[in-house]
Amino acid sequence: QVQLVESGGGLVQAGGSLRLSCAASGSIFRINAMGWYRQAPGKQRELVASITSSGNTNSADSVKGRFAISRDNAKNTVYLQMNSLKPEDTAVYYCHADVSRTVFSANNPYWGQGTQVTVSS
């Protein structure tokens, strides 16, 4: 099994910052893409940012210039630095990873349990 454990969510005022972390553990051969998604009440889950194993990143237009994704491959951990937070960033943030469990395995998607981020105006 593979587990993704997120941390770092919380309540912050508009304009503030938070840093989310997500550590993967378990039966892992290789972690390929990792990323962060979010889901606000009544809305669909959306991609916030993603990063490949070689460090190529992609992010939603709504967070460009404010959020930065990074990863530490040695620690199987992905981070999301969130600056200049806005009330519309309020959501549950989910970590995602594409993991190969053995050298012969294809990628399988895994999700964290989610962490709440609330931005007050």
Image: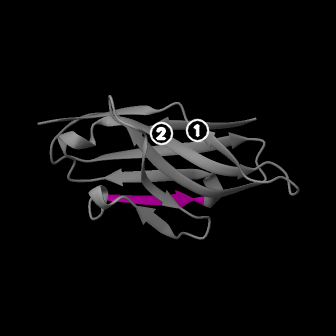
Could you say where residue 97 lies in the image, as x and y percent from the top left? 61, 49
Q: Is residue 26 above or below residue 29?
A: above
Are discs 1 and 2 less than 8 Å apart at CB?
yes
* Helix, strand or loop under label 1: strand
Magenta span: 67-72
Residue 40 occupies quadrant? top left
Could you say where residue 14 lies in the image, as x and y percent from the top left? 15, 43
Q: Which residue is at the far right? A: 104
Provide the residue designation for mark 1.
Answer: 111
Could you say where residue 63 lies in the image, as x and y percent from the top left? 30, 57
Provide the residue designation for mark 2.
Answer: 94
Image point 45% across, 45% down: which residue?
Answer: 37
Disc 1 to disc 2, how far (Cα)? 7 Å
Q: 90 and 47: which one is in front?
A: 47
Could you say where residue 59 lies in the image, as x and y percent from the top left? 40, 61
- How packed mark 2 is, by other alpha carbons closer than 10 Å (few <14, some 14-19, many 20 or more), is many
Mark 1 vs mark 2: which is more N-terminal? Answer: 2
Tell me the kind of residue under disc 1.
Trp
